[in-house]
Amino acid sequence: MEQSGIKVYGYRWVVLLVFFIINALMQLQWITFAPITSEAVAFYKVPAMQIDLLSLMFMIVYLFVSIPASYIIDTWGIRIGIGIGAALMGIFGFMKGFYGASYNMVLIAQIGIAVGQPFVLNSVTKVGVRWFPLHERATQAGISVLAQFVGIIIAMAATPYLFTSYGMEKMLTIYGIATLAGAVIFLLLNKEHPPTPPCPPGHDERIGVFAGMKHIFKQMDMIYLLIIFFIVLGIFNAVTTWIEQIISPRGFTITQAGIAGALMMVGGIVGASIIPPLSDKMRKRKPFLVLAMIGIVPGLVGLALVGNYWLLLASSFIFGFFIMAGGPVGFQYGAEICYPAPEATSQGLLILAGQISGILFIFGMDVATAERASKTPAMVVFLALTLACIFIALMLKESKLVKTDDI
């Protein structure tokens, strides 16, 4: 197939499919215990904080592994880089199922999977530059991010059913077998690059990782983008973590909180399916980043203040739609403005910024408010930070490369 004089290959969709699968499975392994926290506390006979630690460990480990993972991906490519993540996920996911009766072994397995996570998360833009022409890369990033929502939704929907039907050990075994199978499929079908690059000759070359990091931090637009990701991704992590405590003081039930959280994920899926392809079609990045920042505001206002259940659901959908629609566009924008810096390095820094702020915001909301007290003041602070992000996004310059197929 020829596009703009550049040959692209249909096998790129196979590569994207297997990448989609391990992205979804990684999120499933991360969030496995969230829908059954109380049941897990009773099964393992440990405090609730130790069950929360099984999920929180992913954020903590990411802080230490992100930059080394990006270095490996950018130095040795996606076959080795993502392959390490897939292998760790498959091996330790299976181990989690095999030793599902032991909390300590499950924790060790969870740490092993968490080490593999940055090798997968940080590879979104690298897969795009290896296999996709520039005007398809935001779409490819959107589909990759979409996989993460799919994994979360599967975990939220399937975990309670599987636990009730088969028990903890068999449920984890089912997930372990699925994860191992997904890893094997990825390792068999993933390829490093097509016979010819999806860009003009020579434009697939990148500078070294450390030189790339120096180049990245010289780009003022990338500094602005890092600030935006620090704020917005941190808010998303905090809101999804504390959704029940945020809305319960206004009389909403746990079930209603669960539905609101699920609808937030659905909004993210819809947003990631619509906005990145529009960005590719129109060959613009900045307007969609500004739109995403503006769209987050009514979602946050509703989550913080409304007392009507239907308005809450609408707010949750809007919040999820815009906050996760902007992510793939932001990843691709960062890769373009930082060219010729390696893509996994720029993307890894953006996610790292959001993981750091996520931990700070999550614990900050916990420390700043007493148990069962209103978290509205924290939400007002988040709203003010989001308004600041609108002005920061307006200062961004449009990517000079988005109208070309030069990278």
Image: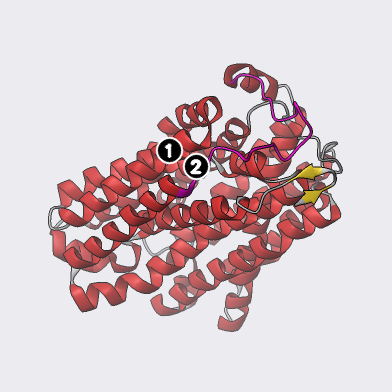
| Residue 287 at least partly seen | yes
- Residue 355 badge: 2
Colour scheme shown: secondary structure
| Residue 369 at least partly seen | no
Q: Give me the C-alpha separation between circle 2 and circle 1.
A: 8 Å
Q: Residues within 10 Å of mark 1 (few under 14, many from 20)?
A: many
Q: Quadrant of residue 29?
A: bottom left
**Residue 301 in picture, x, y percent from top left:** 65, 65
Please say if the residues under marks 2 and 1 sit with CB atoms less than 8 Å apart. yes
Q: Quadrant of the C terminus?
A: top right
Q: Residue at x 51, y 51 (%)?
A: 19
In-front residue for pair 23/214:
23
Closer to the N terminus: mark 2 or mark 1? 1
Q: Does 275 sit above or below residue 132?
A: below
Left or right: 149, with 347 as reference point: left
Q: Amino acid at mark 1?
A: Tyr
Q: Does 285 sit above or below residue 150?
A: above
Q: Does 361 sit above or below residue 167?
A: above
Q: Amino acid at mark 2?
A: Gln
* Residue 201, magenta (yes or no): yes
Q: Quadrant of residue 347?
A: top right
Q: Residues within 10 Å of mark 2 (few under 14, many from 20)?
A: many
- Dominant SS in magenta: loop
Badge 2 element? helix
Badge 1 element? helix
- Tell me the residue that label 1 is attached to: 62
Q: Quadrant of residue 288?
A: bottom right
Q: Does 237 sit above or below residue 339?
A: below
Magenta region, residue range: 189-208
**Residue 54 in picture, x, y percent from top left:** 29, 50
**Residue 385 in picture, x, y percent from top left:** 66, 48
* Residue 340, magenta (yes or no): no
